[in-house]
Amino acid sequence: MELRHMRHFLALAEERSITGAAKRELIVQSGLSNSLQALERELGTPLYVRGTRPVRLTAAGEALVAAVRRALASAAQAAQAVHQTRDVLIGT
């Protein structure tokens, strides 16, 4: 799974709107939809119910939310760990 697909999915889950999620992620709605479709293809199941307002997640989508939050938090921690090493002097 790509981190951007997970970010887009989480934005949709939290905003409950394609428009709101796209605005939050600073992409066009069609780009967000394509990203979500790619994630659904990869997972082999629909993650949200199309045509509902506000957007409703499927059972699979609801199950994915917590795991995506943890994965994105872990990715942020990994990036932070690398950034913290930039100012460390190494020598003998």
Image: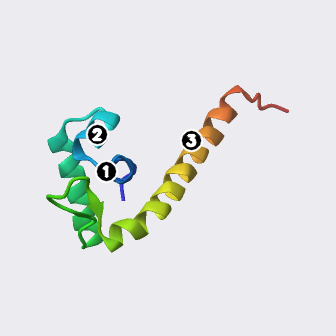
Residue 81 versus residue 42 in the image, above or below: above
Alpha-carbon span between mark 1 and mark 3? 28 Å
> Which colour assignment does the render follow?
rainbow
Image mark for residue 57:
none
* Chain-order first, disc 2 or disc 3: 2
Instruction: Give residue 29's quadrant in the image.
Output: top left
**Residue for point 61% across, 39% down:** 80
Q: Which residue is mark 3?
A: 79
Kind of residue at disc 1: Arg
Is residue 76 left or right of 61 when viewed as pictured?
right
The answer to the question of whether label 2 and label 1 lie on touching residues, with beta carbons closer than 8 A, is yes
Q: Which residue sits at x=20%, y=58%?
A: 37
Residue 70 spot, x, y in % from top left = 54, 57
User: Do the numbered discs 1 and 3 sit on residues whose CB atoms are within 8 Å?
Assistant: no
Identity, as a three-letter code, of the amino acid under mark 2: Gly
Q: Position of residue 88 (x, y in %)?
A: 74, 30
